Image (cartoon, rainbow, N blue to C red):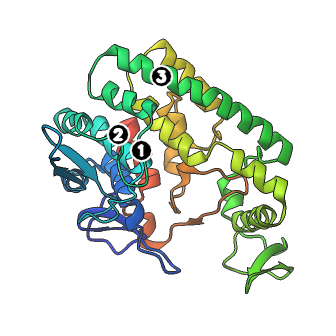
């Protein structure tokens, strides 16, 4: 349930969705456009839409006719210099999901290829922007074909590497976010890895696996090298939104099957985006987390904790977005 006035893990400021950071940080302003886009897809609230549009600054150039738009990560031109493709993509996808076609056309027609000083858009992204703004079937086919050419080798390499290192395991959320004091783990203390045999109430099983993964990537060259070769899970989540918002074609069906073949069965969002049926009962049983579940894997390469108190009732993006895409509402 959306509650812009709640003091919860996900909270609203300047009509943008932020998150509480326990150990320093910026309350998630660096990913605010991305998170607000997801929230707008989940809650359909007009204030979220207006904050997304406010993150696109209209400007003109002396040597070019017409106008362009410069995106920012947060309200007030914050982090314009390094706004990234995932921020832009998810915000545009939310406009498509909510059928804000006029606004979508205006932005996609006037976004420069270089979206910030640090990042450019790819040709695949450019084709996708034209496709979702209704430029014609040619752009839909071109986007889907280019996406296939990118994903087939990338996801194939992922399967090989995950098999080699045992990263293809899928742990249940119940175990992953649960606690077992009998399981020892690596803990980094004052810059050194220490083997802890005693239990810590705040360290769940997923956290323990993730610490072991971090230790290996720091200390083993080949482990780190192959880890860096993996196609990132956040990029697969991004690709899923792009495919979902594109028109139905034979190529889209192939993309859906390809992405599903590399997705955890418990990643309910990507299952839904790629056309698989997820029951209402399964969605209701899902326990919301502090952190965004659907752009990572529960295989030891990440960890999260259960949301508590009001944080498991309000602004629970990871759960509410499931019901929104299915056309259901969870009170």
Circle 2 SS class:
loop
Q: Is residue 275 left or right of residue 102?
A: right
Can you say whether 274 is above or below 176 in the image? above
3 and 1 marks in contact (CB < 8 Å): no
For residue 140, what is the image quadrant?
top left
Q: Residue at x 55, y 54 (%)?
A: 293
Instruction: Give whichever of 205, 31 is nearer the camera.
Output: 31
Residue 256 is situated, as x and y percent measured from the top left of the image, at: 54, 26
**How crowded is the residue under tag 3: few (<14 C-alpha within 10 Å), some, or many (20+)?**
many
Q: Is residue 16 left or right of residue 172?
A: left
Evaluate whether residue 26 shows in this view: yes
Q: CA distance from mark 3 to mark 1?
A: 20 Å
Q: Residue at x 48, y 42 (%)?
A: 238
Q: CA distance from mark 1 to mark 2?
A: 6 Å
Circle 1 SS class:
loop
1 and 2 marks in contact (CB < 8 Å): yes
Q: Earlier in the sequence, mark 3 or mark 2?
A: 2
- Please state, as top left, top right, bottom left or bottom right, where the N terminus lies in the image: bottom left
Residue 132 is situated, as x and y percent measured from the top left of the image, at: 32, 28
Q: CA distance from mark 3 to mark 2?
A: 19 Å
Name the residue beneath numbered marker 3: 144
Instruction: Tally the numbered discs.
Output: 3
Name the residue beneath numbered marker 1: 120
For residue 206, what is the image quadrant?
bottom right
Name the residue beneath numbered marker 2: 113
Q: Residue at x 53, y 38 (%)?
A: 270
Residue 321 is situated, as x and y percent measured from the top left of the image, at: 41, 47
């Amino acid at each position: 349930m959306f509650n812009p006035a709640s003091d919860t893990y996900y909270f609203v400021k300047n009509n943008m969705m932020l998150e509480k950071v326990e150990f320093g940080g910026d309350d998630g302003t660096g990913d605010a456009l991305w998170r607000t886009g997801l929230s707008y897809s989940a809650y359909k609230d007009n204030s979220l839409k207006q904050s997304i549009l406010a993150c696109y600054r209209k400007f003109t150039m002396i040597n070019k006719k017409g106008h362009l738009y410069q995106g920012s990560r947060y309200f007030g031109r914050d982090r314009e210099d390094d706004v990234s493709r995932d921020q832009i993509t998810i915000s545009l996808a939310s406009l498509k999901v909510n059928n804000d076609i006029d606004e979508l056309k205006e932005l996609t027609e006037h976004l420069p290829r270089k979206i910030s000083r640090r990042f450019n858009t790819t040709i695949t992204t450019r084709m996708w922007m034209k496709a979702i703004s209704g430029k014609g079937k040619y752009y839909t086919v071109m986007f889907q074909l280019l996406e296939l050419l990118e994903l087939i080798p990338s996801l194939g390499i992922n399967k090989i590497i995950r098999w080699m290192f045992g990263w293809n395991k899928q742990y249940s959320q119940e175990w992953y976010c649960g606690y077992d004091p009998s399981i020892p783990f690596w803990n980094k203390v004052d810059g050194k890895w220490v083997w802890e045999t005693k239990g810590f109430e705040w360290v769940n099983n997923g956290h323990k696996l993730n610490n072991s993964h971090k230790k290996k990537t720091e200390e083993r060259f080949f482990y780190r090298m192959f880890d860096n070769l993996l196609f990132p899970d956040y990029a697969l989540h991004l690709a899923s939104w792009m495919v979902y918002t594109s028109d139905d074609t034979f190529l889209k069906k192939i993309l859906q099957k390809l992405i599903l073949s590399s997705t955890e069965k418990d990643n309910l969002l990507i299952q839904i985006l790629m056309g698989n049926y997820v029951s209402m009962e399964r969605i209701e049983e899902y326990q919301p987390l502090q952190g965004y579940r659907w752009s990572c894997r529960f295989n030891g390469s990440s960890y999260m904790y259960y949301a508590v108190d009001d944080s498991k009732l309000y602004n629970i993006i990871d759960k509410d977005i499931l019901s929104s895409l299915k056309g259901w509402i969870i009170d």
